[in-house]
Image (spheres, rainbow, N blue to C red):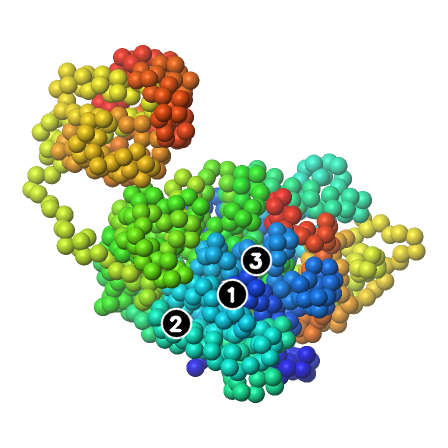
């Protein structure tokens, strides 16, 4: 027996169906765009879902001002190519107080990302926000619905989630309440990479190995992406052939040493690797075991 | 890891492109695991992830540390900790929600819905089962077929899962005894055939030790296979069956980038479609042919069940979200009354007669549910008499929708037969339903279209019919103002009728009491009577507390747009209680009257009434003038 549709075909069709369902009840939807590989796939799916129309919502980048330079370049290029509006939000309070990952630790993520996101959603009155989270990323994500309901204060209550049956999504909400929608919930990291290869989707070059200036700090291999990186005594940037498995704020994102310069090689490394994708991210470990769940309840994506 | 099913490291290392090419052709199987609290369900899933290398070193290190700290396996690796995600359930040591896991083998990608076993979470299992192609029913070899086993099997069958695996777990704890396995299999077979499961695959396993998971175990030489993974990899998925059925595509979104293009976007629920195919648009019944199948990758020559596409039609026919594009020669039915099985999922019990939103495929309509014909005891499968359904209750009911919907029996088409009910006030998903068939009543009781229509009757009276719906607390002044309004209309030669709450309860509704369900039925009947009277051309005035928004909206939906005027007599509770014209507040405060609105029963004020009367700011006379002016002005 040969199945007509492959698992990638099915995942694609499911994601497109989800995005179109959102349009039935949403008043003012937005797509969160973080410029990472998952965002790249989500944006590509949105273009497919509504073609020949452009996706009927803007892109929102909640910026921390500390992303890699290569991310800002791709962001602007993709917004132009897709014909979508790009909204960039930087938390003005974080900006005024000069919040940065070097001096402020967890406060950096809290203010720039968690608070910044809430501000942007409130400011523009977005009632539905697409996010590129996947269930295979982290334990508490595995239980999140595709349509994840948030209170007027953006809180997430794991016990009050709506049952989600078949492919029927309940997108009704009261004034002030909002819904986060995760159209690529059922994709795994491998699916994402294979789809990028199959569809030839542009991604940030940082996913591929290249000689880059790096220092080793707190067990992480960090890239010195610009001159805001304060070098400690004895630290000297060293050119290493590195790449990134996930992308965030450059001072918080660990690189891996690698020679993988093609998609096939990247996938090869991923399949043979022995550590999980989020290990290079500091955010999961703040506050111990249940930290992602706690962040979600506070309104983090 | 040396198991041949998973070992791909060599191929990955030597020829990644060959590996990727083979991986791209994998199919996708969704399955659900069901078991009781201690049947080892999480352990089995943890084992599947572990064996398929879905666990990385850092996760494994965390797992080993956790196993020592909170594990239940005496310091050995506790796979259950891998999948018990939320903090609350890790503390309680139970799974409380549906979690989805992913793993992949050489042949397939798998999505596993991990659902809890205990009774109060039936709704989670139903949720997980709704998308599953296969169910793994776990049984503890030491305990055999339990009440929970029956419940899980019944639910899996109810949701239409065609493949059932009976996994007899913890075989290591019964010495891999064939007799134990045979006895459990036999007991299960007897039960399964009772509920209509004709076919299942029994496998003796140990999730903890790994027996018969990826390969046949030397500990069970008497078992000839298949091992669990082998079975999951080869069981037939329903795709080809869906493709063989007639075309159905629920329209999700009308794609209109400019005046020259009008496409209809949706996911094919069944069948195939090609340009030139004759199609019928439901519910209008209009026919046309497919012009193009449009995608970003270029037009397609054919699309099949499961694909998301955009279709253009050869003719300009009306078609919008909620419509179904179907094979012209084999269209689905449309109807507005059905029999269905309902699984109640909300803490608040079902209220017969209340209007809920019903969502089926891309159709959203208002629907009411009658008291169940019977409730099913999921443990004994007995049919019980029931007046309502509580959380996790399952019953067979009649559903009526306010307009016809396009449907198929759930057994034939899950997309066009499965629906959810949504509470109109809280927006919560309160129930899942599976349609059986339309009720003949709707088809045979044809609407009698007389020669004299409602407009002609109203014209003869020289007026526009309307329903003036007064709502407000007891003692707010509804009846007083309503009475004045009718007197004024009468003086102006308008034909009116005041439907009084007490009077109706003496006759038409004398069989009804004051329970929540009865109060709703009271309002429904009043709404129907008022509707007939407006058909007769009258201006109908009603004065009922009508405390629930949902019921007022139900009546509004019965009438043509603009004929329902909600008049909120807005008197603060303190003021109404101070007046206490009938002495009822005093009785209620003394506990002599139960369910009294404002005291121990809520009043849901209108959010956007057509007219709001603040009785602290104007007299009854002024209020009546204002209402008449708004009505006739």
Going 61% across and 77% down the picture, which residue do you hit? B172
Tell me which label, 1 or 3, sits earlier in the chain. 1
The extreme left residue here reads B451
Tell me which label, 2 or 3, sits earlier in the chain. 3
Q: Secondary structure at mark 1?
A: loop
Residue beneath label 2, please?
B192
The crowding category of the residue bearing disc 2, from other C-alpha atoms within 10 Å (few below 14, some 14 to 19, many at least 20), is: some
Tell me which label, 2 or 1, sits earlier in the chain. 1
Instruction: Judge left or right: residue B187 versus residue B17.
Output: left
Tag count: 3
Name which quarter of the figure residue B295 lies in. Answer: bottom left
State which quarter of the image contains the C terminus of chain B: top left
Residue beneath label 3, please?
B95
- Taking the image as drawn, is residue B359 in sight? yes
- Taking the image as drawn, is residue B297 in sight? no
Q: In x, y percent, where is residue A222? A: 79, 58
Name which quarter of the figure residue B252 lies in. Answer: bottom left
Disc nearest the viewer among 2 and 3: 2
State which quarter of the image contains the N terminus of chain B: bottom right
Pointers 1 and 3 in contact (CB under 8 A)? Answer: no
Q: Any mark on residue B35, and which?
A: 1
Q: Is residue A301 above or below residue B304?
A: above
Instruction: Judge left or right: residue B157 versus residue B283.
Output: right
Q: In x, y percent, where is residue B43? A: 60, 67
Q: In x, y percent, where is residue B487? A: 18, 17
Q: In x, y percent, where is residue A171? A: 45, 48
Query: Gap between marks 2 and 1, in whole Å?
Result: 16 Å
The crowding category of the residue bearing disc 3, from other C-alpha atoms within 10 Å (few below 14, some 14 to 19, many at least 20), is: many
Front in this rendered view, residue B326 or A203: B326
Q: Secondary structure at mark 2?
A: helix
Q: Secondary structure at mark 3?
A: loop
Front in this rendered view, residue B211 or A56: B211
């Amino acid at each position: 027996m040969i199945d007509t549709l492959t698992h990638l075909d099915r995942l694609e069709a499911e994601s497109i169906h989800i995005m179109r369902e959102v349009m039935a009840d949403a008043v003012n939807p937005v797509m969160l765009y973080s410029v990472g590989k998952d965002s790249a796939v989500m944006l590509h799916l949105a273009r497919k879902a509504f073609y020949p129309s452009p996706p009927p919502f803007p892109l929102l980048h909640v910026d921390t001002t500390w992303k890699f330079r290569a991310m800002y370049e791709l962001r602007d290029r993709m917004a132009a190519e897709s014909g979508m509006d790009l909204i960039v939000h930087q938390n003005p309070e974080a900006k005024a107080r000069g919040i940065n990952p070097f001096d402020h630790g967890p406060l950096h993520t809290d203010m720039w990302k968690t608070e910044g996101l809430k501000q942007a959603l409130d400011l523009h009155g977005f009632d539905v926000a697409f996010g590129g989270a996947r269930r295979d990323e982290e334990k508490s994500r595995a239980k999140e619905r595709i349509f994840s309901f948030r209170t007027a204060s953006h809180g997430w209550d794991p016990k009050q989630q709506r049952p989600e049956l078949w492919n029927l999504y309940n997108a009704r909400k009261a004034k002030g309440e909002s819904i986060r929608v995760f159209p690529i919930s059922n994709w795994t990291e491998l699916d994402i990479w294979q789809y990028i290869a199959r569809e030839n989707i542009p991604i940030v070059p940082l996913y591929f190995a290249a000689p880059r200036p790096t220092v080793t700090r707190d067990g992480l291999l960090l890239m010195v992406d610009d001159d805001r990186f304060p070098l400690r005594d004895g630290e000297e940037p060293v050119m290493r052939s590195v790449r990134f498995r996930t992308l965030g704020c450059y001072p918080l994102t660990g690189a891996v040493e690698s020679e993988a310069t093609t998609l096939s090689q990247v996938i090869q490394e991923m399949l043979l690797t022995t550590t999980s994708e989020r290990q290079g991210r500091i955010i999961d470990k703040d506050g111990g075991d249940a930290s992602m769940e706690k962040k979600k309840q506070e309104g983090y994506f | 890891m040396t198991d041949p099913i998973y070992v791909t490291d060599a191929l990955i290392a030597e020829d990644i492109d060959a590996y990727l090419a083979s991986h791209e052709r994998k199919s996708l199987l969704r399955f659900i695991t069901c078991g009781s609290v201690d049947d080892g369900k999480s352990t089995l899933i943890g084992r599947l992830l572990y064996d398929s290398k879905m666990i990385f070193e850092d996760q494994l290190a965390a797992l080993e540390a956790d196993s020592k700290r909170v594990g239940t396996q005496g310091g050995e690796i506790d796979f259950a900790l891998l999948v018990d995600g939320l903090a609350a359930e890790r503390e309680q040591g139970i799974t409380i929600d549906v979690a989805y896991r992913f793993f992949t083998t050489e042949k397939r990608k798998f999505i596993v819905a991990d659902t809890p076993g205990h009774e109060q979470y039936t709704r989670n299992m139903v949720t997980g089962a709704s998308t599953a192609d296969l169910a793994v029913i776990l049984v503890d070899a030491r305990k055999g077929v339990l009440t929970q086993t029956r419940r899980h099997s019944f639910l899996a069958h109810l949701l239409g899962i065609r493949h059932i695996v009976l996994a007899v777990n913890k075989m290591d704890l019964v010495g891999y005894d064939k007799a134990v396995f045979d006895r459990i299999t036999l007991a299960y077979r007897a039960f399964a055939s009772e509920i209509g499961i004709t076919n299942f695959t029994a496998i003796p396993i140990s999730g903890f030790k790994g027996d018969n998971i990826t390969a046949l175990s030397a500990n069970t030489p008497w078992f000839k296979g298949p091992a669990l993974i082998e079975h999951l990899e080869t069981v037939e998925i329903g795709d080809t069956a869906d493709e063989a059925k007639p075309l159905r595509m629920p329209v999700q979104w009308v794609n209109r980038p400019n005046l020259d293009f009008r496409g209809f976007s949706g996911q094919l629920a069944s069948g195939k479609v090609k340009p030139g195919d004759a199609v019928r648009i439901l519910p209008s019944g209009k026919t046309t042919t497919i012009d193009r199948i449009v995608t970003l990758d270029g037009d397609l020559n054919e699309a099949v069940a499961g694909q998301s596409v955009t279709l253009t039609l050869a003719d300009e026919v009306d078609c919008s979200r909620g419509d179904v594009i179907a094979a012209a020669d084999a269209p689905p039915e449309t109807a507005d009354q059905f029999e269905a099985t309902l699984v109640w999922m909300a803490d608040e019990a079902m209220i017969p007669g209340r209007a809920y939103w019903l969502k089926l495929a891309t159709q959203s309509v208002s629907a009411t549910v009658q008291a169940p014909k019977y409730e099913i005891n999921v443990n004994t499968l007995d049919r019980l008499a029931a007046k309502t359904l509580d959380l996790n209750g399952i019953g067979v009911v009649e559903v009526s929708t306010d307009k016809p919907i396009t449907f198929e029996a759930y057994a034939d088409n899950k997309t066009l037969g499965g629906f959810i009910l949504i509470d109109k006030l809280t927006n919560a998903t309160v129930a899942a339903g599976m349609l059986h068939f339309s009720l003949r009543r709707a088809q045979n009781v044809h609407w009698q279209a007389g020669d004299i229509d409602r407009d002609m009757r109203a014209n003869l009276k020289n007026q526009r019919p309307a329903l003036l719906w007064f709502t407000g607390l007891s003692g707010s002044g509804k009846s007083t103002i309503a009475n004045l309004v009718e007197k004024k209309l009468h003086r102006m030669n308008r034909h009116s009728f005041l439907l009084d709450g007490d009077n109706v309860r003496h006759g038409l509704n004398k069989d009804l009491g004051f329970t929540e369900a009865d109060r709703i039925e009271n309002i429904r009947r009043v709404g129907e009577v008022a509707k007939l009277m407006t058909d007769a051309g009258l201006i109908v005035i009603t004065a009922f507390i009508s405390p629930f928004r949902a019921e007022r909206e139900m009546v509004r939906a019965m009438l043509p747009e603009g004929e329902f005027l909600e008049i909120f007599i807005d008197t603060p509770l303190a003021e109404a209680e101070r007046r206490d014209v009938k002495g009822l507040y005093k009785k209620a405060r003394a506990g002599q009257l139960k369910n009294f609105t404002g005291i121990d029963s809520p009043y849901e004020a209108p959010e956007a009434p057509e007219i709001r009367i603040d009785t602290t700011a104007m007299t009854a006379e002024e209020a009546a003038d204002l209402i008449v002016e708004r009505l006739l002005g």
